[in-house]
Image (spheres, rainbow, N blue to C red):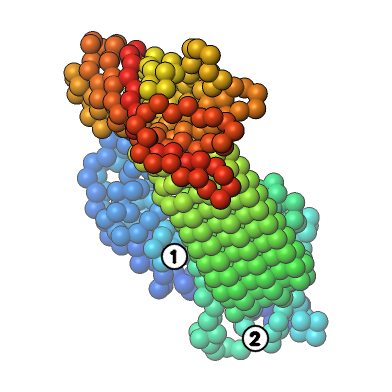
Amino acid sequence: MLYVALPRLMKQVYDNTQSIYKLMTINQKLITRGLALFIPALFCTQLYAQNNLMKEISIGEIKQQRMGSVLDKIASKGNFYFAYNNKTIPADSMVSVAGYRGTLFSLLDKLLGDSYEFKEVPGYIVLRHAPGKLYITAEVDKELAIVKGYINDVSGQKGIPQASVYEKNQLVATLTNDRGYFELRLKNPGGPLSLSVSKEEYRDTALYILPVVNVDSKHNNQNYKYYPDEGSGNGVEHSRFARFFISSKQLVQGMNLGNFFATSPYQVSLVPGLSTHGMYNSQIIDKVSYNLLGGYTAGINGVEAAGIFNINRKDVNGFQMAGIFNVVGGSLSGFEIAGIYNNVLNNSSGMQVAGIGNRTNNFKGAQVAGIANLDQEAKGFQMAGLFNNVKNFTGGVQVAGLFNTGKQASGVQFAGLFNWSTGQTGSQMASLFNVAKKVKGFQLGFLFNVADSSDYPIGIINFIKNGEKSLAISTDENLFTHLDFRSGGRVMYGLIGAGYKFGDAWSKYALDLGFGAHIINHSKFSLNGEYVVELITDTKKKFYQTQSFKLLPGYKLNKLLRLFAGPTFDITGSDPNDDAQIHGWELSKHIGTDNNITTLSIGVTGGLQFVW
């Protein structure tokens, strides 16, 4: 539909009258067979729809401002939005206006010129570059239930190929051929028809075909919805994967008809294009959609199911299921399940389940995938058989069989192998290692943790940029000499080291693994608590194990050196043949049913630390 001001409408009526005259002289039979009147469809809707365009506005002097900024200011005062394509509307160009008082339409005409058309829909004024003009000649064959005719360019009178011809009330559409000829099959050939024509770079035009004198205004009971162009270039038309399943005619149809969509209670498709809505299917939002093999619709407000795939240009609200994949060009709200793959090009909320992978722009809810979840942003619960890759995980839980990666993760990450975040993160748990920049929670990695800032790393080795690292030499009540490396953050740290016992005893070698906490960290005094597992062996057959809980006060000689010493509470488990050497204060000894000996004792340890 084309919306114009009254002066331009009068000129349009004049032009159309001349076209009718030409049509009468060329084909008198065509006129007498029933196509009575050629009027732009917008002429009728103009009287009730152009509230904002015909409003009187007043603006002060504008000097060298971006056109986009000027449009935003006008829209904010009028409580509506301008919708346009940045590629065809010079939003970044600088404009100047020496004060203005008049209609909004006249101002837009002054700013943009007569090569643009302005459409008004609820909440929006659509600005469209449309320098070309076209006209329709058509006739109805009631026996065959088709309407056929030509779409021509007004200036050169040449046929317009690949133009979309559609009847909004019957929800049928087709494309013209190379000569501008079309045939449109009708569902109700006896009723009034409102043929609309859309083509890129041309102004929308319509033809009313009236079988009776009185027009029933209640007949136009279809609901229509307008989606503003978000300018992201992320629609299904730009997806190579989705375009493989969409015909070129359907893509052209979508480009011609733009962002105006109708609603319908249901549709049934065999494949895209072979549908109860035919070529118009990509412009219709359905409540119930069933695709035997696959379908291509404007969107869903209800339920959609397909044997192989579903492709939707805009939003899906409700339930969607496909045997292989779903591709949604807009947003998803509800539950989506696919045997292999779900891809939502914008935002999603609800639940996604896929045999292989889920992919969205911004997700909130729960995602489950056999292999991977891939999102720009996500919040909620994610579970993947192999990995989750989310640029910004803003809260919730991630669980992956192998790894979780992303820029930031504010929730909790669980991974079979590792978690990797290049920014701030919440908490990380992995069997091997964790990497982050700033950790607000804790890091639990068996091998190592890496971070710029992490107060609670729990791992054997922790590379924390602002944390503490130390190398200590110490001895204990069993006369082992230990060399231990401690590394961690402001509170927690890990420990790994080795010990050697001088003398003739068989138990000469020890391996130390553990973690600890800085309880007090004063400028001169410190107090650490540690849990250490010590494996004592002769490297051949004999070995036993001691678990120690240590409380280690320390005195800082300077910034690099610290003396420490304190008591240890030890639990030693050994076999009678291992001849475990325990020289501390023995509290109790217990022999189990398997003859293993468990000894509780108190010992002491102390040494010197080099801290950095």
Query: What amino acid is at disc 2?
Result: Gly
Callout 1: helix, strand or loop?
strand
| Residue 351 at x, y percent in the picture | 53, 62
State which tag comes first along the sequence, 2 or 1.
1
- The answer to whether 133 appears left or right of 414 in the picture is right
Residue at (62, 22) in percent of width and height: 539
The part of the image, by quadrant, that contains residue 273 is bottom right
| Residue 67 at x, y percent in the picture | 37, 41
- Cα separation between marks 2 and 1: 26 Å
Residue at (75, 56) in percent of width and height: 245
Near mark 2 (Cα within 10 A), the count class, few <14, some 14-19 or many ≥20, is some
Mark 2 or 1, closer to the camera: 1
- The answer to whether 360 appears left or right of 474 in the picture is right
| Residue 221 at x, y percent in the picture | 53, 81
Mark yes or no: residue 65 visible.
Answer: yes
Instruction: Find residue 191 and name its label.
Output: 2
Q: Which residue is mark 1?
A: 121
Mark yes or no: residue 201 visible.
Answer: no
Please, which residue is most extreme toward the right here? 144
Query: What amino acid is at disc 1?
Result: Val
Instruction: Find residue 164 and name its label.
Output: none
Callout 2: helix, strand or loop?
loop
| Residue 392 at x, y percent in the picture | 45, 43
Above or below residue 98? Residue 315 is below
Nearest the eye: 512 or 205: 512
Nearest the eye: 189 or 295: 295
Above or below residue 321? Residue 438 is above
Above or below residue 125? Residue 275 is below
